[in-house]
Image (tube, grey):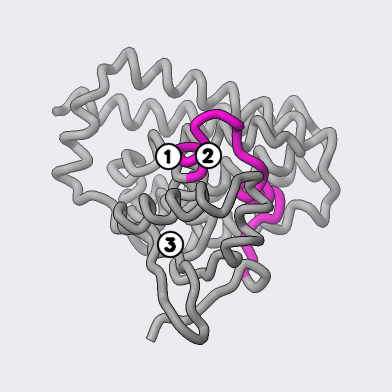
Amino acid sequence: MRRVVTVKQQGYGGGARRAVFAPVDSRARVDAVVHRLGDAIELGLLADGEQLPGESELAGRLGVSTVTLREALMALRQQGLVTTRRGRGGGSFVSLPELPGADRLRARLRGWSTEELRDLGDHWAALSGAAARLAARRTEPDDLAPLRRTAGELAGAAGPAARSRVYGRFHVELAAAAQSARLTREQVALQTEVGALLCLVLGDDEYREEVADRQLRVIAAVQDGAHASAGSLAERCVQESTARLVAVRLTL
């Protein structure tokens, strides 16, 4: 039986999770809720089996009507990202999707030109570098616990799928540590776009260890308030990942 994890019990980064449940844009609210929750589920910001807040509470937190929320939950159920149980102990529960297999990921990567990948990498590096610099100026040492936990998870993650989710979550939590809701939302959207592709480069244990070490150095620089160093380290981490994706793309 799958263990039920409630929102209050879940230990992932508070800042990133607050961004997940912040009010959505007033336009196309059903789609906005579907994208917000769907992206968070695919990135692992909401855990597999986690129970979402009740409809009234969740609708209030997202700033939408219960009718809108129900439509969004129906769409998420159709996508296999949420399951609903009736009766005592029922509610809506997260269902973590399996990432596509290597062949499907390579096919998806073939849809990107090398120029598009480099452009995406530039955008990602700019976001993560800015987040790291802001976090070094704004965050307190105790606020870095989610980042440390995520870096530790990457060091022990066994397969490419788990590694790619944890890697993406690190960058989202870095944006959350910058105390910028907009940066956090941008990073969530970007990781949803690129995150699965990272499975193609994170299967290498040596590279996984290299990434984990770089993440720890980013955290140390943020904690020390070394904003320039933190930004540079975060950018280099992204640039190396992008370069590896481009290298894979060139072989296809």
How far apart marks 3 and 2 lie (CA) works out to 20 Å
207 vs 37, nearest the viewer: 37
Look at the numbered discs 3 and 2 and tell me whether their residues touch, using CB distance below 8 Å: no
Q: Position of residue 148 (x, y in %)?
A: 66, 56
Q: Position of residue 47 (x, y in %)?
A: 50, 64
Side of 147 where 124 appears, left or right: left
Side of 182 where 136 appears, left or right: right
Which residue is disc 2 drawn over? 188
Q: Amino acid at mark 2?
A: Val
Q: Which mark is residue 192?
A: 1
Which residue is disc 3 drawn over? 157
Q: Which residues are magenta?
A: 10-33
> Quarter-wise, where is residue 120 in the image?
top left
Is residue 48 covered in magenta? no
**SS for dot 3:** loop
**SS for dot 2:** helix
